[in-house]
Image: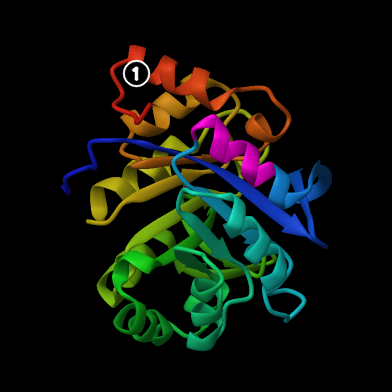
């Protein structure tokens, strides 16, 4: 079993569509949550450890990520910024890093062209490459989905996570589609499995509704917890969350 990171990270996620932050349930039913630059700036001030920015329809619409929005966001944010959505070439990654992003998140293109992970890690370093894995329980196993959750690849999630690790990914952004937006808690089963069976940090995503849910993700092996709705709509304050986690014995940066 791998050694978990000591300090746990809190990562607000900005799902962006048509230049606006949105949030849905189980990847559908999107609701407006504000201007991405302003939302990111607020999280930077509130004490988030990182921000993840996902252009959720870029791959499905076969277009590039919104560079100008990212450029403006990077000017206002002084914590690591991870960006995903529509990344298909090494030049795409270069452009994102060049406007101030720190890491990139690759999902569909990594599944369709696994060797791209090797090339990206070799060119930009493993610490720059996050592979996003969207999973859904199908029968008794977890399958990997792509194109914003529209296509079941039939791939076993744990097998795929181990493959991307071996290809040079530096982190896994693990999203449970079953739990996404439900606020009923993270899928602790797949979080634990992924944590136990790979040697790189696991970012738990999908389902956060309470501070306890986030603590549970950490006690089941996650190195970071990503959430959207609870932060976007003011249900949980990041500073309060970190104080709660510290009181529960979870090491966080205050």
* Above or below for 42 versus 203: above
Instruction: Please provide percent x and percent y for residue 3.
Output: 16, 45
Q: Can residue 208 be seen by looking at this rendering?
A: yes
In reply to whether residue 178 is colored magenta, the answer given is no
Q: Residue at x 69, y 25 (%)?
A: 234
Q: Hey, which quadrant is residue 59 in on the image?
A: bottom right
Part of the protein shown in magenta: 39-47
Q: Is residue 158 left or right of residue 100?
A: left
Residue 42 included in the magenta stretch of the image: yes
Quarter of the image containing the C terminus? top left
Q: Quadrant of residue 171?
A: bottom left
**Does residue 169 appear to the left or right of 58 in the view shown?**
left
Q: Residue at x 46, y 48 (%)?
A: 79
* Residue on which disc 1 sits: 246
Q: Which sits in the foreground, 205 or 177? A: 205
Q: Is residue 199 above or below residue 48?
A: below
Please state which of residues 181 and 46 is positioned toward the viewer in this rendering: 46
* Residue at 31% from the left image edge and 51% from the top image edge: 201
Mark yes or no: residue 182 visible.
Answer: no
Expressed as whole percent of the image width and height from the top left, the position of residue 84 reads 57, 65
């Amino acid at each position: 079993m791998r050694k978990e990171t000591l300090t746990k990270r809190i990562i607000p996620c900005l799902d962006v569509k048509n230049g606006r932050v949105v949030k849905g349930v189980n990847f559908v039913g999107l609701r407006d949550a504000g201007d991405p630059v302003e939302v990111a700036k607020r999280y930077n001030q509130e004490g988030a450890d990182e921000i993840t920015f996902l252009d959720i329809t870029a791959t499905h619409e076969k277009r590039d990520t919104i560079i100008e929005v990212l450029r403006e966001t990077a000017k206002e944010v002084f914590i690591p910024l991870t960006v995903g959505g529509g990344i298909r070439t090494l030049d795409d990654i270069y452009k994102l890093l060049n406007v101030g992003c720190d890491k990139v998140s690759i999902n569909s293109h990594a599944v369709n062209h696994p060797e791209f992970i090797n090339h990206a890690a070799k060119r930009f370093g493993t610490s720059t490459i996050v592979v996003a894995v969207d999973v859904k329980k199908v029968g008794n196993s977890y399958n990997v989905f792509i194109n914003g959750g529209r296509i079941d690849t039939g791939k076993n999630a744990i097998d795929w996570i181990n493959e991307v690790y071996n290809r040079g990914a530096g982190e896994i952004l693990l999203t449970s589609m079953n739990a996404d937006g439900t606020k009923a808690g993270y899928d602790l089963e797949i979080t634990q499995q992924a944590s136990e069976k790979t040697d790189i940090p696991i970012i738990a995503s999908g389902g956060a509704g309470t501070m306890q849910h986030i603590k549970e993700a950490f006690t089941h092996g996650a190195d970071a917890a990503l959430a959207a709705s609870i932060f976007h709509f003011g249900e949980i304050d990041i500073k309060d969350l970190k104080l709660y986690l510290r009181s529960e014995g979870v090491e966080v940066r205050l």
